[in-house]
Image: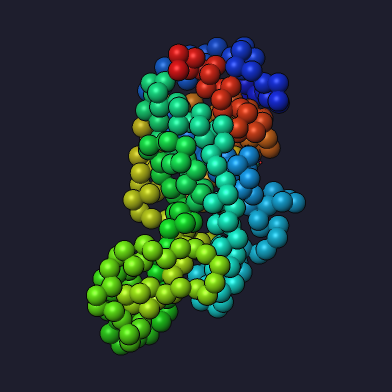
Amino acid sequence: MPITSWKVGAGGTARATASMLDPRLIADLRAARRVVVFTGAGMSAESGIPTFRDRLTGLWAQVDPMEVATARAFRANPQRTWDWHVQLAEAVRAAAPNAGHAAIAALEQAGPEVTVITQNVDALHHRAGSREVVELHGNLLRLTSFVDEEAAFAAASPTICRVCDGYAVWEHCDPYAERGDLAAIELRAGPVPRCPGCGALLRPDVVWFGEPLAVDAIEAAWNAVDRCEVLIAVGASLEVEPAASLPWRALARGARVVEVNPVPTALAAQCHAVISGAAAEVLPALFAAIWPER
Ligand code: APR
């Protein structure tokens, strides 16, 4: 393994794709009833959203993630963390799904049951029309309250605010505040907003380093991986757990695993095919070759 490894550039066509893949693998992919598409930041690169670990243009080449993407960083300097996320939100708002997102959404019409498991927080899979999407790392444009666990445990009698379900920390808590009041606040430039209900600082609803994933999200991902016959890993460096283990979990359970990435990852040596190229070019060609009836 891998059985097949090929490179697609601007000239990559569906016909070339089909002839380059191992016929046994094509047959397995075609026969699959359940497909998982597992995506990382490279999926949205051609939509104009930077990846994290590209050596020159990646977000983590510009700033230490420990300074903007941890609860500790937010506690120390909420405004800096907020401002960094506002910048990313601008890129996400300006972005549109690319041909790769569209090809994944259209794959549902080709017959297999498709589950998208994404580490991306840009909601571009939803916007492209994918129906079954597991957002492992949350959603950047959704806000939640920052529950400062250190302060909450220090307080004598913490209470739960009905607006945000966080600990009430503000003496002017508005008992008439509604969930709609929270929904009306957006990730925009300006001072860090507070929950109208409890006064807690608001934060983007994403998973920062050191935080656990939502239990329902990781369970949904494990269930989909355990049931799939094919997993296609797209644009993920596989450096962050527990998401990084999902393709290996699929392999261990006997699924066919294909990697789509211009730079092969550690998975490349283990999976059934490696397609070296950009998601927006490779996925439409790959899917047209495997599921031409679409
Ligand atoms: N098409 C497909 N893949 C691409 C493209 C492209 N056009 N451009 C880059 N890539 C690949 C890179 O080669 C790399 O393997 O996308 C991957 C991006 O890797 P990372 O930047 O590490 O992004 P990701 O794997 O999603 O990071 C995981 O790290 O900081 C956290 O929470 C953040 O969800 C993120 C997690």
Indicate whether 229 appears above or below 189: above
Q: Residue at x 63, y 52 (%)?
A: 52
Residue 269 visible to the viewer: no
The image quadrant of residue 84 is: bottom right
Q: Residue at x 49, y 63 (%)?
A: 187
User: In the rendered view of the protein, which quadrant contains the N terminus?
Assistant: top right
The image quadrant of residue 66 is: bottom right
Q: Position of residue 150 (x, y in %)?
A: 42, 79
Indicate whether 208 appears above or below 262: below
Q: Position of residue 27 (x, y in %)?
A: 48, 14
Q: Quadrant of ligand 1?
A: top right
Image label count:
0
Residue 261 visible to the viewer: yes
The answer to whether 230 appears left or right of 59 in the picture is: left
The answer to whether 260 appears left or right of 193 in the picture is: right
Q: Nearer the viewer, residue 283 or 243?
A: 283
Q: Nearer the viewer, residue 193 or 52?
A: 193
Q: Position of residue 114 (x, y in %)?
A: 40, 31
Q: Residue at x 57, y 36 (%)?
A: 98
User: In the rendered view of the protein, which quadrant contains the C terminus?
Assistant: top left
Q: Position of residue 192 (x, y in %)?
A: 50, 73
